[in-house]
Image (cartoon, helix red, strand yellow):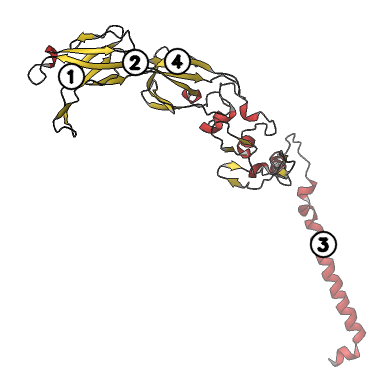
Amino acid sequence: MDWIKKNYDRFALAVLAAALIGVAALLFTNVNTFSEQFAEAMAPVMKNNKIAEVDTTKIDEAKEQFEKPAQWTPRQEGKDLLHSGLLFTAEPYYVNKSRMLTKPGSDSLYNDSLTGKPMPNAWFMKNNLALLDPAVQFLDPDNDGFLNEDEWRANTDPNKPDSHPSYESKLFLKDWLKQPFRFKFQAYDGDPKKDKAEDITFQINPLDAGGRTKFLKIGEMIEGTKFKVSKFEFKEVPNPGTGDSKEVSELTLTHVETNETVQLIYNQVTDSPTQFAQLEYFWKKKQGEAGQVFVVPKFKDFVLLQPNLDPKQLYKLLDVNNDGALIQRPDGEKYQVPRFPKK
């Protein structure tokens, strides 16, 4: 330590010399490895005409978002959408008869002309129908012969011809027609307690067919009518006034075409109306246009005009009254034809 103090300048010079030698050795080493470190960069570039694939994921995502904007989950009333669901798009409004702005999804502009029930505006909007057209419920956009209100009533698609209500749904009872036909079972020749019904002769007066009395047996036709005598049943009931018995025997007549039966009570007049249904068919008819009117006798077959009509597609009138008619469809099922509502 004393030597360093006495020879400080020589020591400092020695340390500096050693540092210079170390730096020189490091530089020498780096110079020798320089070419190795930059060999890859200095290597000749190989020609390649292949273009690297571009990742278009982000571009595709942006395109999809542009073509299909984000939507809200629309509110619903049953299954009818009340809003289109587009972001920043207000619900459409319309002006009703009182000039008040009303939301289409929450109201009904039109009532079904047959049932009087309100038709939801949302149903028209869901099926892309012109809600603001005053005649929209009476239009037939798919030209299948059924109006929009018919399709709504049957829950079918108004824009698809193959989706439509049944053809008999356009059939209505226009009138119930009755042709009076009075009979009187006046007497009989024989003893019903001893004789067989087939051996007894019955006296019948068809009051609306000339008024001539007929004497007939079981199985014989009544002249001037389509009825035959089919059955006889002897009956008596107590007579409260006299204490003895009162005869109320029944003679059954059968219509040979319809199989309709009429029971004649002994010594009484029986009214047996021949019944008809006057029907009106509105398929392919516009609102307010008269339908096809035809008359069908009870128990008779008839056809309904429709596309690709099969001659075997027969309907049958089973019954009729003032409220409607009961028919049998071609598939054997029964259908109640309503009376057309009076305005």
The label on residue 28 is 3
Q: Which mark is nearer the camera, 2 or 4?
A: 2
Pointer 1 local density, CA inside 10 Å: few below 14, some 14–19, many at least 20: many
The label on residue 10 is none
- Alpha carbon separation for disc pair 3 and 4: 123 Å
Residue 112, position as x, y percentages in the image: 58, 33
- Left or right of residue 276, residue 240 in this image: left
The label on residue 295 is 4
Residue at image mark 1: 232
Image quadrant assignment for residue 81: top right
Q: Which mark is nearer the camera, 1 or 2?
A: 2
Chain-order first, disc 2 or disc 3: 3
Amino acid, disc 2: Phe
Amino acid, disc 3: Phe
Q: Which mark is nearer the camera, 1 or 4?
A: 1
Q: Is residue 215 placed above or below 177 in the rendered structure? A: above
Q: Is residue 110 visible?
A: yes
Image quadrant assignment for residue 286: top right
Chain-order first, disc 1 or disc 2: 2
